[in-house]
Amino acid sequence: MNGSQMTTIGERKRLSHPLKIEATSTVGRGKAVILDTEPAQKHWSDRWVSLALGDSLSLYESWERPTVIVSDGAYGVLGFEGDTSDHLNLPDWYEPHVTAWSAAALPSTTLWFWNSEIGWAAVHPVLERHGWRYVGANVWDKGKGHIAGNINTNRIRQFPVVTEVCIQYVFEARINGLPLKEWLLAEWKRTGLPLREANIACGVKDAAVRKYLDQGHLWYFPPVEKFGMLVAYANQHGHPGGRPYFSFDGVTPVSESEWAKMRSKFSCPHGVTNVWQRDALRNGERIKAPNGRAVHLNQKPLDLMERIILASSEAGDVIWEPFGGLFSASFAARRLERHAFSAEIDPTYYQFGIKRFTSPNDPHQLQLW
Ligand SMILES: C[S@@+](CC[C@H](N)C(=O)[O-])C[C@H]1O[C@@H](n2cnc3c(N)ncnc32)[C@H](O)[C@@H]1O
């Protein structure tokens, strides 16, 4: 056998399953503390949050349907027990979760998907296949402080990575199996009225046909008052035999308030862009074990969690955090008076995470033993 034909056992395994490289280990790297105590309670809740020790997959069905899902799960970096060793396994890792999210999503649900760039690229097709529509990519730039000049670029042979991404998706609303823009056009056509009359219905020169009934990228979600005008006109002037037009139930036309719920919420504070320049967690922000070490390597900044929750929900809405860690999104949600549902599978992280809620004045010096 010449050199070019030789393969190691590892390579042969890889070649026989090119997309199924097994994780070399499922043990999380750098876990600073492992509690050998089991938590007294496997569930903790107050007026705003409901936090469980367990697999979120078995809990989704018991959670109220979400306005927002904040996903900060596997990155393919062996970041925690059960994380995969590279991005190739991420689609399989996420698929059951994405399936469950789609089953629970409302037309107004936003998903924020945190990951590395390559992790997101790997999972994006799964999200699309399950009805999640890409809106935008936000880049968390942790700045040069994150690498502190320690990186040997000759060895890593790439520019040092100081970013993560947080991708905004919305759940594609469908009525009678049709995406909204197709349903709007189909209903208008059912009236028997010419397309251009939609402009008269909405009191505009040509915007209705050009925007609300367009089937391409120019399509625009009709604002509630324009939708109301479209519906009123269609039901007054459309062919009497086909009434009601624009109805969910075939009995009454859709109201303006029902229409408002057919899309996700979004508001952006002035001056915020999709590049989030925000240092990596500073020492004082990290949840520390009594030995002084950071409890969770993936703990997210509360201000970024607050930013995405504020942008996509209102007080009283429901936020899901399927991969709790130290429950940063739930903690932010509670501060913003949203209801949060979360699960963490690892008892150590769960116990430290819960302490954030039960000892709010002493979040960084946790005495668990
Ligand atoms: C990237 S970390 C989340 C960190 C979190 N955003 C924070 O700020 O603390 C992902 C967490 O998800 C947990 N996890 C993984 N699979 C899970 C599952 N099926 N159910 C619940 N938790 C899970 C891991 O143990 C890990 O702590």
Image (cartoon, rainbow, N blue to C red):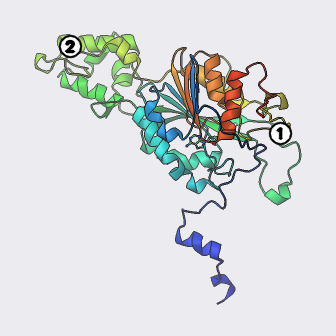
Q: Position of residue 352 (x, y in %)?
A: 71, 33
Q: Position of residue 144 (x, y in %)?
A: 83, 39
Q: Position of residue 199 (x, y in %)?
A: 31, 15
Residue 310 visible in the snapshot: yes
Residue extending furthest toward the bottom: 1
Q: Would you identify the image quadrant in which residue 329 lies? A: top right
Cα separation, mark 2 vs mark 1, equals 66 Å
The residue where tag 2 is placed is 235
Q: Nearer the viewer, residue 203 or 109?
A: 109
Q: Secondary structure at mark 2?
A: helix
Q: Secondary structure at mark 1?
A: loop
| Residue displayed at 44% across by 39% down | 100
State the mark number for residue 361.
none
Q: Would you identify the image quadrant in which residue 210 lies? A: top left
Q: Position of residue 339 (x, y in %)?
A: 54, 20
The residue where tag 1 is placed is 293
| Residue displayed at 26% across by 10% down | 232
Judged by depth in the image, the label closer to the viewer, 2 or 1, is 1
141 sits to left or right of 171: right
Q: 46 above or below 343?
A: above
- If you read the primary sequence from the N terminus, does the residue marked by circle 2 or circle 1 appear first? 2
- Quadrant (top left, top right, bottom left, bottom right) of the N terminus: bottom right
Q: Nearer the viewer, residue 154 or 282?
A: 282
| Residue displayed at 50% across by 21% down | 265
Q: Which residue type does callout 1 highlight?
A: Arg
